Image (tube, rainbow, N blue to C red):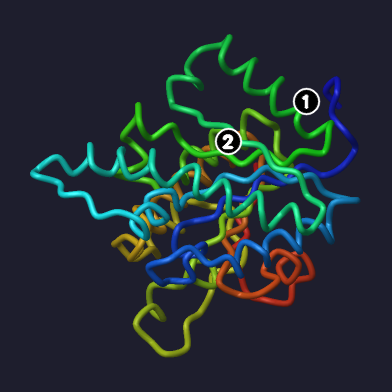
């Protein structure tokens, strides 16, 4: 075990925009409270790091900016407006449950520089040692890749790998990844256990989520990064109440991608 790390299992929880909004146009305080209650129930055995989307969705509740053909710039501005509001909602709801929060804004360049990687790891370890839950988002005002492509899936994977997470849970709006044959049927069939990601890629449907910028493709790419690091990935329906506890107790269907 690395210096300064507790014996608790380290879980990185990535929460997509559709989960945080419960597939509406507004951030759900009830969903954030649901997440906080579960973390509070599990805090004796697990330590959590959160990668949260949703800053742009929060901002759209307050402002309406015109794009004038500058769509990415407007989304960056919306992220800058929404990020403090999103953190305030987390802080207020978690504080009522006795949980402390902290904010970390990262960019992809941070993962490419050894000094930055070391600083990120050391800072987050200190936060966890002192009982603070790091809530991470991309620094959208200086970076655009996640705004365009990933809804923070790749950021979650890189962070999970850097932190040596024991498990990464990606909360989305489906019961994991469905078989291609069942995708358009009323009864969906979840692919529950996966080792071969090449086979899994052939099953996924194209397209992105309604509120976020991600889709199953970006989640599998994230799982690929994590699998190479030997980290297990779960893709779980975050719209369900108590989705973390239910997945841990195997009470719901979800996709489990083995770490190799």
Using the image, determine if residue 26 lies above or below residue 118: below
Count of residue discs: 2
* Residue 90 position (above or below residue 106): below
Q: Percent from the top left, x then y, of residue 83?
A: 46, 43
Q: Secondary structure at mark 1?
A: helix
* Quarter holding residue 36: bottom right
Distance from disc 1 to disc 2, alpha carbons, whole Å, reads 26 Å
User: What residue appears at the point 21 percent right and 49 percent down from the top-left corner?
Assistant: 65
**Residue 228 marker:** 2
Q: Looking at the picture, tell me which residue is in the foreground, 240 or 201.
A: 240
Spot the residue most to the bottom. 186
Q: Is 238 on the left-hand or right-hand side of 152? A: right
Q: Quadrant of the N terminus?
A: top right
Q: Could you say which quadrant of the image residue 157 lies in?
A: top right
Dot 1 crowding, Cα within 10 Å, few <14, some 14–19, many 20+: some
- Discs 1/2, front: 1
Q: Nearer the viewer, residue 155 or 1?
A: 155
Q: Quadrant of the C terminus?
A: top right
Along the viewing direction, whichever of 259 and 244 lies nearer the viewer: 244
| Residue sitting at x 53%, y 74% | 190
Where does residue 207 sit, x and y in percent of width and height? 29, 62
Q: Which residue is mark 1?
A: 126
In terms of sequence position, does the residue under pointer 1 or pointer 2 come before the other?
1
Q: Which residue ends up furthest to the front in the rendered image? A: 62
At x 50%, y 39%, the residue is 137
């Amino acid at each position: 075990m690395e210096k300064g790390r507790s014996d608790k299992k380290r879980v990185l929880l990535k929460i997509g925009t559709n989960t945080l909004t419960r597939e509406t146009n507004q951030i759900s305080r009830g969903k954030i409270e649901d997440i906080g209650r579960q973390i509070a129930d599990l805090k004796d055995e697990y330590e959590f790091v959160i990668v949260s989307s949703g800053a742009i969705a929060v901002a759209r509740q307050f402002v309406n900016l015109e794009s004038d053909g500058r769509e990415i710039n407007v989304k960056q501005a919306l992220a800058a407006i929404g990020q403090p509001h999103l953190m305030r909602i987390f802080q207020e709801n978690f504080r009522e449950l006795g949980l402390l929060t902290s904010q970390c804004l990262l960019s992809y360049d941070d993962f490419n520089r050894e000094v930055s990687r070391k600083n990120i790891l050391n800072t987050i370890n200190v936060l966890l040692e002192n009982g603070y839950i790091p809530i991470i988002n991309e620094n959208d005002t200086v970076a655009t890749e996640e705004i365009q492509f990933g809804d923070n899936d790749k950021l979650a994977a890189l962070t999970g790998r850097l932190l040596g997470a024991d498990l990464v849970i990606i909360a989305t709006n489906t019961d994991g990844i469905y078989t291609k044959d069942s995708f358009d049927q009323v009864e969906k069939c979840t692919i529950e256990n996966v080792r071969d990601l090449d086979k899994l890629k052939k099953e996924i449907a194209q397209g992105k989520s309604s509120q976020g910028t991600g889709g199953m493709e970006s989640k599998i790419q994230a799982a690929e990064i994590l699998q190479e690091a030997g980290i297990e990935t779960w893709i779980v329906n975050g719209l369900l109440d108590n989705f973390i506890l239910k997945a841990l107790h195997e009470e719901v269907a979800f996709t489990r991608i083995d770490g190799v």
